[in-house]
């Protein structure tokens, strides 16, 4: 898979990405904002195992964010199951030297569109920690809306924290605009 964008490409992970992946992922500031499944310190072994596992996964839902061919970050989604199979959770990180250039926003917009179109999703959500103002801003710029503050819902680095629930919701094509709806008493 490859999405060619203005600032970056979102593409399949390659075995050769292990070296830059180790270099950029081995960063406490990144680890502090991700789930504990993301290792710290991040070793070359972790990078090889991650790339092997995402390349073997079917369907492929986790991708490299590449700048000038080099993998500098990751963006991926987890498809929910059963009655929530129209939903997915999305996550991302960018190597620190590349922060503040709009790369995460561009990658998030592109992968949101890809996931919705490929899996007929109606909703994609993200759960940044409340202290992660940069990620909240990225989600807002990408068209996600704040739905809830999940109070004391997570623990990171030994600290209980709130999570901010953001979602991108695909409008229901059959839903009438609120102003076009018949008055309550005349509804069937
Ligand atoms: C969050 C992260 C992905 C942002 O990546 P990025 O490529 O720098 O994002 P963008 O450049 O597209 O946008 C960043 C926005 O956040 C803003 N921002 C950065 N730090 C901020 C802060 N402390 N407070 C408020 N806004 C902040 C920037 O000004 C920018 O907004 P603007 O375009 O309106 O100026 C990156 O910092 C990162 O990887 N962090 C660690 C991992 C992480 O948090 N992942 C998300 C988990 S939910």
Image: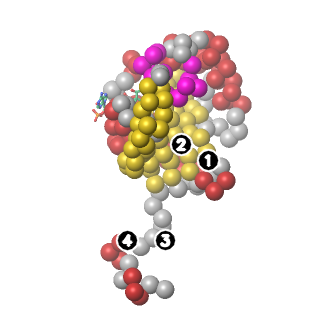
- Relative to residue 74, is residue 178 depicted above or below? below
The kind of secondary structure the magenta stretch mainly shows is loop
Query: x%, y% of residue 112?
Result: 49, 45
Tell me which segment is drawn in magenta.
27-39
Q: Residue at x 40, y 48 (%)?
A: 148
Badge 2 crowding class, 10 Å Cα cut-off, few under 14, some 14 to 19, many 20 or more, is some
Considering only order in the chain, which callout, 1 or 4, is on the residue closer to the N terminus? Answer: 1
Badge 1 crowding class, 10 Å Cα cut-off, few under 14, some 14 to 19, many 20 or more, is some
Please indicate, yes or no, whether residue 140 appears anywhere in the rendered image. yes
* 3 or 1: mark nearer the eye: 1
* 4 or 1: mark nearer the eye: 1
Verify CB contact (< 8 Å) between mark 3 and mark 2.
no
Element under label 4?
loop
Q: Which mark is residue 89?
A: 2
Please indicate, yes or no, whether residue 68 appears anywhere in the rendered image. no
Element under label 3?
loop
Q: Which mark is residue 177?
A: 4
The answer for how far apart the CA atoms under marks 3 and 2 are is 25 Å
Q: Would residue 37 be counted in the magenta stretch?
A: yes
Element under label 1?
loop
Query: x%, y% of residue 146?
Result: 37, 47
The answer for how far apart the CA atoms under marks 4 and 1 are is 28 Å
Verify CB contact (< 8 Å) between mark 4 and mark 3.
no
């Amino acid at each position: 898979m490859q999405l060619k964008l203005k600032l970056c490409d979102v593409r399949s992970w390659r075995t050769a990405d292990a070296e830059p992946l180790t270099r950029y992922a081995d960063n406490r500031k990144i680890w502090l904002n991700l789930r504990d499944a993301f290792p710290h310190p991040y070793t070359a072994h972790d990078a090889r195992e991650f790339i092997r596992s995402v390349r073997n996964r079917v369907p492929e839902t986790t991708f490299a964010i590449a700048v000038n061919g080099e993998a500098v970050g990751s963006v991926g989604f987890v498809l929910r199951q059963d009655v929530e199979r129209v939903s997915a959770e999305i996550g991302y990180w960018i190597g620190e030297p590349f922060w503040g250039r709009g790369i995460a926003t561009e990658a998030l917009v592109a992968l949101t569109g890809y996931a919705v179109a490929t899996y007929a999703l109606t909703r994609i959500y993200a759960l940044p920690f409340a202290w992660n103002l940069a990620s909240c801003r990225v989600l807002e710029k990408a068209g996600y809306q704040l739905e809830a503050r999940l109070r004391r819902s997570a623990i990171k680095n030994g600290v209980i924290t709130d999570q901010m629930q953001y979602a991108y919701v695909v409008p229901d094509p059959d839903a009438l605009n609120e102003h076009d709806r018949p008055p309550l008493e005349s509804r069937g």
